[in-house]
Image (cartoon, rainbow, N blue to C red):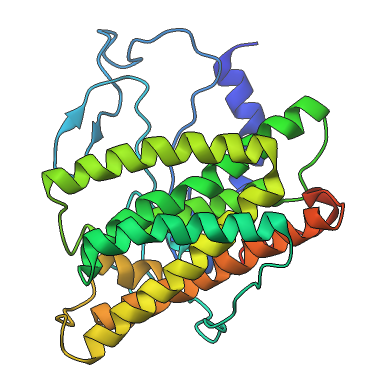
Amino acid sequence: MSSKLIYRTLRPVLSSSGLGIGPGIRGHVISHLSTVRFLSSDTSSPVSGNNQPEKPVQTADGKVISTYWGIPPAKITKPDGSAWKWNCFQPWDSYKPDVSIDVTKHHKPSNFTDKFAYLTVQTLKIPVQLFFQRKHMCHAMLLETVAAVPGMVGGMLLHLKSLRRFEHSGGWIKALLEEAENERMHLMTFIELSQPKWYERAIVFTVQGVFFNAYFLAYVISPKLAHRITGYLEEEAVNSYTEFLKDIDAGKFENSPAPAIAIDYWRLPKDATLRDVVYVIRADEAHHRDINHYASDIQFQGHELKEAPAPIGYH
């Protein structure tokens, strides 16, 4: 059967599935590709026949990527009609965080594993505090490069376990990867405000390499320990951002306008400031604290994560 015949056969299905131009998610308009290419092994243009790309892809800085297989991105607009400018996340990835969460909660160590996890985090905190002291922006960037690791490692290992055992994860793969992506967006926000120096990049490179491998081994050996360590790390992150807020309120740190990426990601008002950004990031960290202590509690009680509902979309 030819590709044209297949397309004519599937066209009603594609139309009913939303391909074409129409309303997108939460009021955002999405313009998809006008045509779909099926089962083609011919890489030449059907029009020119000279191996030229049908639709070259243009990057954000105006450069053209000349490849036949380039897929032009969907044209997405905000509810007010303005163009959506971010490729790192889409409108449906944005959210308004729950800032009413209790940021003072602490899991009191009650057994050897808890005490070991708590002592580990407290030991790691000492050199960090000595180095950064009140350099909140630099501290935040280092913190986020580390904080984005546990969710990715945990999600990856659960993904492999799901494949190996031919079983569902109960949604925990998605929940942990959401956490990792959220932490990465924290970093993408901070680099809009400050660029790390070369020695800070070197520190990040070293710390991330050591922490990734150490956390990977910890998760393989004892997932409940790994999640407890992450829970305590998130508690320290909450405390760090609380100190950041205090210095902003005291006038020790400039309360500059919030970057555009933060306004769109957390759906902040257009006149939002750095304080608003730090405030919602602290709330995010508190949610990650809860998720990881919850995951550890599940396993301490002799259950697997898949047996409990995963906190997907817990913001």
Which picture quadrant has residue 135?
Answer: bottom left
Residue appearing at x 15%, y 44% in the figure: 199
In the rendered structure, the answer to whether residue 287 lies left or right of residue 87 reads: right
Please identify the quarter of the rendering in which residue 30 is found: bottom left
Where 100 falls versus 8 (above or below)? Answer: below
Residues 275 and 293: in front is 293
**Residue 84 seen from this side:** no
Q: Quadrant of the C terminus?
A: bottom right
Nearer to me, 15 or 115: 115
Q: Please name the residue shown 14% across and 40% down the image.
A: 62
Give the left or right position of residue 250, taking residue 163 as reference.
Answer: left
The percent position of residue 286, horizontal first and vertical second, equals 53, 72
| Front-lying residue, 66 or 151 | 151
Residue that lies at the very extreme toward the bottom in this rendered image? 250
At x 48%, y 8%, the residue is: 41
Q: Is residue 312 above or below residue 306?
A: below
Percent across and percent down for residue 155 are 61, 43
Say if residue 62 shows up in the picture. Answer: yes
Image quadrant for the N terminus? Answer: top right
Q: Look at the picture and state if 45 lies above or below 130.
A: above
- Depth check: give the residue in front, 26 or 306: 306
Q: Residue at x 14, y 34 (%)?
A: 63
Q: How many marks overall?
A: 0
Classify residue 294 as left or right of residue 301. left
| Residue 314 image offset from top left, x and y in percent | 61, 67
Quadrant housing residue 38: top right
Q: Check the image and report above or below for 254 versus 66.
A: below
